[in-house]
Amino acid sequence: MKFFVDTADVDAIRELHELGMVDGVTTNPSLIAKSGRDIKEVTREICEMIPGPVSAETVALDADGMIAEGRELAKIADNITIKVPLTWEGLKACKVLTGEGRMVNVTLCFTANQALLAAKAGATFISPFVGRLDDINLDGMELIAEIREIYDNYDFSTEILTASIRTLNHMKQAALIGADVATAPPSVIKSMAAHPLTDKGLDGFLKDWAKTGQKIL
């Protein structure tokens, strides 16, 4: 499973990238706003650092506006993925932009039917928001499993990009189900390394080592 990092924090992206933990980046207007920087400037810096797909989101509501904004965003770098919402207008924009050979991430997906439409429209990525479904007492990971089954049934090339990840369990379940990509905040990706038994074991090893009075260096 590929890891995309869901942030516009360049320093956080760089740290994970240096460890080989970043295959791509997803941004949105909210994340750009948090960075306090110009959208084109910060997106260009991320694209120069990360060779994989970098999602940049359109803000227009009509297809023509999304297409125009998508073409402008695509000028930033060759690895830009244009992000459009899963609305009828967004699907129209997706069809045109993918027809031009551009990568498109169709976002804000909440049903398998929506994901099926996105695949038919030629989406490069579909972004189901599992955390937001969990927020309303629905099982977000069940949606990932449904999309995986549908896409496999018909051999769609659209990649499932599990989004709105909030927990370590989301990461594990996405991998078990067979999602192509998981996009998560840096904090979630880094916390995957943590376990209390790891800490306890390390503490024991160090105490035993101290008793020997030896040094490696």
Image (cartoon, rainbow, N blue to C red):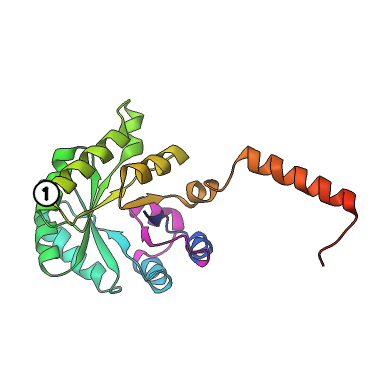
Query: Which residue is at 53% across, 51% downward?
Result: 190
Residue 51: image quadrant is bottom left
Choose between 168 and 47: the one closer to the eye. Answer: 168
**Residue marked by disc 1:** 154
The answer to whether one can see residue 167 in this image is no
Residue 41: x percent and y percent?
Answer: 38, 70
The answer to whether residue 208 is seen in the rendering is yes
Q: Residue at x 28, y 67 (%)?
A: 80
Where residue 125 sits in the image (x, y, percent)?
A: 23, 55
Q: Is residue 161 or residue 69 the one in the foreground?
A: 161
Does the magenta run of residues contain 214?
A: no
**Could you say which is closer to the camera, residue 77 or residue 151?**
151
Give left or right: position of 8 versus 181: right
Say which quarter of the image contains residue 26. bottom left
For numbered disc 1, what is the local secondary structure?
helix
Q: Is residue 31 magenta?
A: yes
Residue 7 at x, y percent in the picture: 42, 55
Q: Amino acid at mark 1?
A: Tyr
For this orientation, the residue located farthest to the top is 137
- Image location of residue 158, percent across then percent down: 19, 55
Residue 202 drawn above or below residue 72:
above
Q: Image point 34% across, 31% down: which residue? A: 134
Q: Tell me: 124 left or right of 42.
A: left
In this rendering, is residue 163 above or below 38? above
The residue stretch that appears in magenta: 18-39
